[in-house]
Image (tube, rainbow, N blue to C red):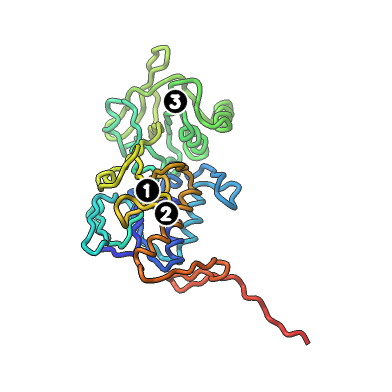
Amino acid sequence: MITTDILIIGAGPTGLFTVFEAGLLKLRCHLIDALPQAGGQCSEIYPKKPIYDIPAYPEILAGDLTDKLLEQIKQFEPGFTLGERAETIEKQEDGTFVVTTNKGTKHHAKVVAIAGGLGSFEPRKPPIPNILDFEDKGVEYIIRDPEFYRDKKVVISGGGDSALDWAIFLTDVASSVTLIHRRNEFRGALDSVDKVQELKDAGKIIMITPAEVKGILGTDKVTGVSLIQNGGEEFTIETDHFIPLFGLSPKLGPIGDWGLEIEKNAIKVNNALDYQTNIPGIYAIGDVNTYPGKLKLILCGFHEATLMCQSAYKRIFPNKKYVMKYTTVGGVDGFDGTRKEAPKAVVKKIE
């Protein structure tokens, strides 16, 4: 069984920053995430998209933000259980918790912080009769590694930011990129739409609109797709991969069955104090929670994580008084023996 002070469910930006704030309080953290890597949506859905509202970063790619957060918490040596979903929770007689994943991994913690973003995500799948037969055989709903498509023929379907951005990105990777949308108008960022138009004019993207994919061709793997255009014309095109990017549906998943107070698919918390749920010892921070005036911003998640850790410290050490010191004064001591501190002033006697 894995033991820790704070068990964080969700390894997105808010969950990762929680490790830093907990580390300042000498509290150890372990994170669970259903995704195979840390970073949440920033790594899984839009790693190449810029974020503009992170303090001190006029612009930073979502994937780079994850890398910076991982670098920031490295000295606090967090543990990770990745590729597993938190399934059940049991409160112990001493007030601690045991959380078990869908793969049977057990975690024992004094405090649980749910930082699951918008919850677990399930791709919105187009109503194509045989699409399930080709999942992981040429049909992918999320692009994890662009190099996987190196020198391959790729068909992307969708009209939003993800479809546009990946169509643009893969022109330098795939041997051919075809973008299919059921309308002539796209609902993505204007500069992305303009860029796709430029690439189409340059012959680097094949655009077919308005049209829809109605079937997938192949036996053991995808070899092509069948389409129908708005006028009713049907035809097929060859491809190695079909990637329908119609967004993801957020779901709380098993967490919704833990006895927490839920409002509109989010967890209600006490924002007047510490973002604790209706179950003492279980907190919810970041996009997964709700309260009057809630804003779903990474910045707000960082703030909530900071106050939550202060409350967690008081719960774990009820007889200890913590005196907050600014990192500029007290420095940062890692569990790995490293220390970060401001250079000491040099005192020199003048003769």
In the rendering, which numbered label is found on residue 200? none
Q: Residue furthest front?
A: 272
Mark 2 in CB contact with mark 3 (< 8 angstroms): no
What is the secondary structure assignment of the residue under circle 3?
A: strand
Q: CA distance from mark 1 to mark 3?
A: 42 Å
In the picture of the structure, the residue carrying the numbered disc 3 is 180
Nearer to us of marks 2 and 3 is 2
**Spot occupied by residue 29 in the image (x, y as percentages of width and height):** 37, 62
Is 5 above or below relative to 292?
A: below
Residue 311 in the image: x percent, y percent?
40, 60
Binning the other alpha carbons within 10 Å of mark 2 as few (below 14), some (14 to 19) or many (20 upward) gives few
Name the front one of labels 1 and 3. 1
Q: Quadrant of the N terminus?
A: bottom left
Furthest residue in direction top, as rendered: 231
Q: Which residue is mark 1?
A: 269
Q: Quadrant of the C terminus?
A: bottom right
Left or right of 40? Residue 90 is left
Which structural element holds mark 1?
loop
For badge 3, the amino acid type reads Ile
How many numbered badges does the structure rendering display? 3
Cα–Cα span, label 2 and label 3: 49 Å
Q: Residue at x 53, y 70 (%)?
A: 331
Q: Which mark is residue 273?
A: 2
| The one of 178 and 93 positioned closer to us in this rendering | 93
Q: Earlier in the sequence, mark 1 or mark 3?
A: 3
